[in-house]
Image (cartoon, grey):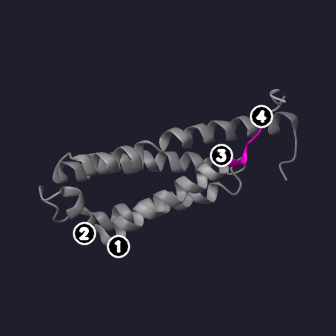
């Protein structure tokens, strides 16, 4: 019953992680795009200069990366490049927030939450899913098995 399969399997919970990560990224990016100034005031906790922060651009780019992650869940083995694009997008968004927003917002519990749990944390499950998709893809290519 607990025997290991002789070939790599891409379980449904990996797809679920991609869907969840994509929707989570889309949701937070929508907050940045459409409620940017109010969200920045909330992040700043009354300190820092929040005028002129590019929240619309940050939200728009985040929406694109979130959509790529979400779409990759439909054919994760074939569209493995979309998963890596999503991982790269999360790295870009985390770097942009850390270098572009944190100097003005100052470091506090809200900015730490956003940076750690909304950007950096998702790199772990996305990387695990990406590696499993690569394993399955290489197995299928090696054995010339049709994915459909």
| Alpha carbon distance from label 1 to label 4 | 42 Å
Q: Position of residue 140 (x, y in %)?
A: 82, 39
Tag of residue 14: 3
78 vs 49, left or right, is: right
Q: Answer with mark 2 or mark 4, whichever residue precedes in sequence.
A: 4
Q: Could you tell me which secondary element the residue under label 2 belongs to?
A: helix
The residue that disc 2 covers is: 38
Q: Residue at 71% across / 34% down in the picture?
A: 135
Considering only vertical position in the picture, is 108 above or below 60? above
Of the pair 18 and 4, the residue shown nearer to us: 4
The secondary structure making up most of the magenta span is loop
Q: Could you tell me which secondary element the residue under label 1 belongs to?
A: helix
The residue that disc 4 covers is: 8
Residue 11 drawn in magenta: yes
- Report the mark closest to the observer, 1 or 2: 2
Q: Residue at 68% across / 41% down in the picture?
A: 133
The quarter of the picture where the N terminus appears is top right
Tag of residue 34: 1
Q: Label 2 neighbourhood size at 10 Å, few (<14), some (14-19), many (20+)?
A: few
| Alpha carbon distance from label 3 to label 1 | 30 Å
Q: Answer with mark 3 or mark 1, whichever residue precedes in sequence.
A: 3
């Amino acid at each position: 019953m607990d025997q290991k399969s002789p070939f790599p399997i891409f379980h449904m919970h990996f797809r679920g992680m991609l869907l969840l990560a994509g929707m989570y990224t889309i949701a937070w990016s929508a907050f940045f795009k459409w409620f940017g100034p109010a969200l920045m005031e909330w992040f700043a906790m009354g300190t820092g200069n929040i005028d002129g922060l590019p929240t619309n651009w940050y939200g728009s780019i985040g929406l694109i990366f979130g959509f790529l992650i979400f779409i990759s869940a439909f054919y994760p083995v074939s569209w493995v490049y979309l998963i890596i694009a999503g991982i790269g997008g999360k790295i870009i968004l985390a770097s942009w927030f850390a270098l572009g927003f944190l100097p003005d917002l100052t470091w506090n519990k809200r900015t730490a939450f956003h940076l750690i749990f909304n950007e950096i944390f998702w790199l772990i499950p996305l990387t695990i899913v990406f590696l499993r998709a690569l394993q399955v893809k290489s197995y299928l290519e090696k054995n010339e098995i049709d994915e459909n």
